[in-house]
Image (cartoon, grey):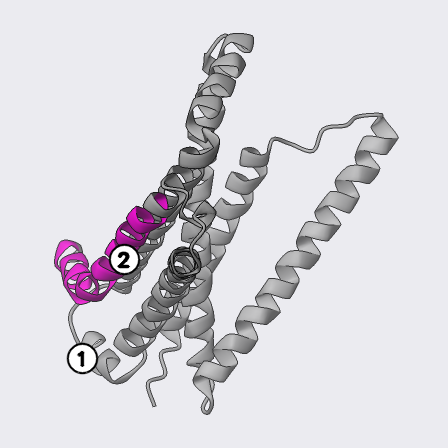
Amino acid sequence: MLGKLMKYEWQSTWKLLLPANLLIVVMTFFACMTVRLRLMDVDNDGIIFSAVMILVTYAGSMFVVMIGTAIYLIYRFYTSTYGDQGYLLHTLPVDKHHIIIAKVTVSTAWVLFSSFLIYLSLVFIFANEQGVIPELIDSMESIAEEFGGRPSFFAGIMTVIAFMVQILARVLKVTACLSLGQLSPNHKLLMSFAYYFGIYFIQQMIGSFYYAFLGLLNNKMELYYYGRPWEITLIVSLVYTVVFYAVTWYTMEKKLNLD
């Protein structure tokens, strides 16, 4: 059943999100050509204006795709789970865990896919002008030689894993807020936003207290260790993933309110 749910989610999302992500590829091509041909340096107002419009459209398309993907996935989860479609979904003999896993997995995959395309796009844009790729390879080789090759490679892999878990935690944070918001008898979406900003504020407070405590502890023990970036990101994201998943499941299983 989990496979069928995931297949249905892909079929319901790819027709909109795949063309949106292909827009990144198309605009990257035009932006790369604009930078490579140095159209901004041409002594022609019409060509310069066209080049500026291409670059502005490129930047705007990156923003629209990322924000649009997030808004669509939020809308998709809410309407298919707690909206009119939710009545049908929750009457099916499907475990709530399968529903959450299917929707969150597909949503996370789309966010990662869009983020990956935008990252590659920026690399290609700057590489054309500044030679970023050769310099990046040289710096990575130097680090690998300094640490014998293994530590830098391991840190790179763990950084990617930490980033993926962080995206998963953010998606589950949204599902948790939407789940809590549907408990309200009125203004469910408004309450979901309220929960989101409330949780965000709590997260910031926890982070501030953590670094303040760690700084005090380091000062007392004359240490200067705050953890590697990927370690902190991975541990915190794993904790939030478990918490937000539990909140989503509990409200969907025990407190479902589709009125």
In which quadrant is the N terminus drawn?
A: bottom left
Magenta-drawn stretch, dominant element (helix, strand or loop): helix
Disc 1 secondary structure class: helix
Residue 105 appears anywhere in the view = no
Coordinates of residue 89 in the picture (x, y in percent) = 20, 75
Q: Which residue is mark 1?
A: 88
Nearest the eye: 73 or 139: 139
Q: CA distance from mark 2 to mark 1?
A: 34 Å
Please give left or right for residue 224 compared with residue 131 in the image. right
Is 114 drawn above or below residue 71 in the view shown? above
From which residue to which does the magenta span run? Answer: 3-32
Is 221 drawn above or below residue 54 in the view shown? above
Residue 186 appears anywhere in the view = yes
Q: Residue at x 47, y 25 (%)?
A: 136
Front disc: 2 or 1: 2
The residue sitting at the front extreme is 43
User: Dot 1: few (<14), some (14–19), or many (≥20) neighbours within 10 Å?
Assistant: few
> Which amino acid is tagged 2?
Leu
User: Dot 2: few (<14), some (14–19), or many (≥20) neighbours within 10 Å?
Assistant: some
Q: Which residue is mark 2?
A: 23
Disc 2 secondary structure class: helix
Q: Which of the 4 quarters of the picture holds residue 80?
A: bottom left
Coordinates of residue 72 in the picture (x, y in percent) = 33, 70
Q: Was residue 10 drawn as part of the magenta stretch in this picture?
A: yes
Coordinates of residue 255 in the picture (x, y in percent) = 40, 77
> Which amino acid is tagged 1?
Leu
Coordinates of residue 175 in the picture (x, y in percent) = 40, 66
Which one is earlier in the sequence, the residue at label 2 or at label 1?
Answer: 2
